[in-house]
Image (cartoon, grey):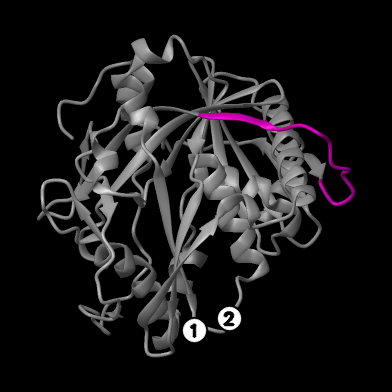
Amino acid sequence: MLTIKQLNNSATKHELNLKKVESSWISLKGPKRLGCFSSYYNEENVKIYCPDKSLLAYLDIPEPLFIDCLQGYDPNVKYGHQSIGNIHLLRWVMDNEATLEDYPSDFVCYNGLLKDMMMSRYIKDHWDFFAIKIKGKIIMLRIDSKKKQDYIDEQSAWNNKSTYVALNLRRLITKTDNGHESNLVKEGESCHGIFHSKIGCHRILHAGWLDCVESKEELTKPFDQIKFGSIKKIQNHHETISFNAGNTWWSLATLSGVETITCARCEYDFTVDHIDKLSVSNLIPRERQMEFFTSLNLMLDYIKSIVTEDNQYYDFYFNGTVKTLTGCERMNSNEKIIPSWYVDGQLPHVS
């Protein structure tokens, strides 16, 4: 990725300022569910792609409710390095070209990036991503920075436990249909939904992590009728949902069509004896929802105006201090992040 200095010195630099943007009445149409894929790490620590919902779990809260969320915790491991496997979304796209003929798209990305675009006016951190247009679609992906990796490696013991618990909680209150107990923390097991949405003139094919479905019975329904749920935690009984958590939970849930969040209240020792059900629609006020949709639409407008050449990488950098998005063509780089099998239209022979 380009550094801030390189972006500032680039002759092709462009900038979008989101600081004084007024909200519009634009809304998100969707998400329409198109399918899903599962993935896990094998014994060689290679992430394996499965074109199905085999790792989609259902909510199974133990009774009586008392959970030690630190069970299995290893203080010698730094948690939070799990990768979502960027290429698996592209693999799904190639596997389902016939389906996508009915759902043309301008952008392909993960929900995490769309979430940051939506929340951009409230995010203080800096973040970046790259984009490339292939076969008429702008693929937007994020690569974990060294700064993020260092932050995870240097996090305190308490924060490391908190990160572990956020992951482990899902394993402890869900089950899969085949009776296999998920080992999310150690193996990175996940199920991602594929969605199609539209905002303004932009058509988006996007993927998001599916925490669970509301009950085992939901797994027998057609995929587009399943009631998905999200699993979150807050620390201790008395803490209210923070401003940032409310924004984040609402954005990710909205992008995945989730209506209810299962929220565990952790004590300081990371035990849980109380779980709330939260309505996504009530997490943030309507006015802020409109701000989020406005920001997303403006950013996609801007990105589309920058990414004009086929098969050319572009770098984007968001400055959380001044609320600007800067984009430019990547110069003199031989790095090829998108796999050749996607560019050439030839499916890989291995997962």
Residue at 55% x, 40% y: name it: 130
Magenta region includes residue 60: no
Residue denoted by label 2: 239
- Which residue is at a point 38% across and 67% down the rendered structure image? 80
Looking at the image, residue 137 lies above or below residue 65: above
At label 2, the amino acid type is Glu
**Region rendered in magenta:** 18-31
Alpha carbon separation for disc pair 1 and 2: 6 Å
Element carrying mark 1: loop
Residue 117 numbered mark, or none: none
Q: Quadrant of the C terminus?
A: top left
**Disc 2 secondary structure class:** loop
* Left or right of residue 44: residue 74: right
| Res. 54 in view | yes
Give the residue at the far bottom of this rendering: 269
Q: Nearer the viewer, residue 309 or 44?
A: 44
Whether residues under marks 1 and 2 lie with C-beta atoms below 8 angstroms apart, the answer is yes
Q: What amino acid does circle 1 point to?
A: Asn
Q: Is residue 266 above or below residue 300?
A: below
Q: Is residue 327 left or right of residue 88?
A: right
Residue located 35% across and 23% down the image: 342
> Residue 207 location, x and y as percent?
43, 37
Residue 60 location (% of width, % of height): 26, 60
Which mark, residue 236?
Answer: 1
- Which of these two is toward me, 334 or 132? 132
Q: Position of residue 218 (x, y in %)?
A: 29, 40
* 3 w.r.t. 35: above or below: below
